[in-house]
Amino acid sequence: QCLDKYPVEVIYQFFNQSWWFIDVYYMGLTGKVAEWAICKQKSHRRVGQCTIMSVDAMLT
């Protein structure tokens, strides 16, 4: 009943955004770095290893 209040597109966007964060957290990124990686790789299907390597280079 609660899900009937929201359009399917909104639910889809929520799950899609959640999947991005799950993927990035699994790779070891957190907080602002995770948000940056998601924003940077939004047009791709997943956050690439190259992005993770560039984050590691910035942090060290």
Image (spheres, helix red, strand yellow):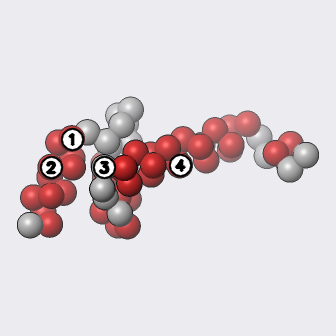
Q: How far apart are marks 2 and 4 (CA)?
A: 22 Å
Residue at the far top in the pictured view: 45
Residue under circle 1? 49
Residue under circle 4? 18
Residue 45 is situated, as x and y percent measured from the top left of the image, at 38, 32
For badge 4, the amino acid type reads Ser
Confirm or deny contact between disc 2 and disc 1 (CB under 8 A).
yes
The residue lying at 35 percent from left, 63 percent from top is 30
- In the image, is residue 32 above or below residue 5? below
Confirm or deny contact between disc 2 and disc 4 (CB under 8 A).
no
**Mark earlier in primary sequence (3, 2):** 3
For badge 2, the amino acid type reads Met
Confirm or deny contact between disc 3 and disc 1 (CB under 8 A).
no
Is any part of residue 31 visible from this angle?
Answer: yes
Instruction: State which quadrant residue 15 falls in.
Output: top right
Residue under circle 3? 27
The residue lying at 68 percent from left, 44 percent from top is 10
For badge 1, the amino acid type reads Gln
Q: Quadrant of the C terminus?
A: bottom left
Q: Distance between the residues labelled 2 and 1?
A: 6 Å
Q: Distance between the residues labelled 3 and 4?
A: 14 Å
Instruction: Please tell me whether mark 4 sits on a helix, a strand or a loop.
Output: helix
Q: Distance between the residues labelled 4 and 1?
A: 19 Å
The residue lying at 9 percent from left, 58 percent from top is 57
Mark 2, Cα crowd under 10 Å, few <14 / some 14-19 / many 20+, is few
Q: How far apart are marks 3 and 1 (CA)?
A: 9 Å
For badge 3, the amino acid type reads Met
Residue under circle 2? 53
Residue 43 is situated, as x and y percent measured from the top left of the image, at 37, 36
Q: As rendered, which of 20 and 39 lies closer to the eye?
A: 20
Foreground: disc 3 or disc 4:
3
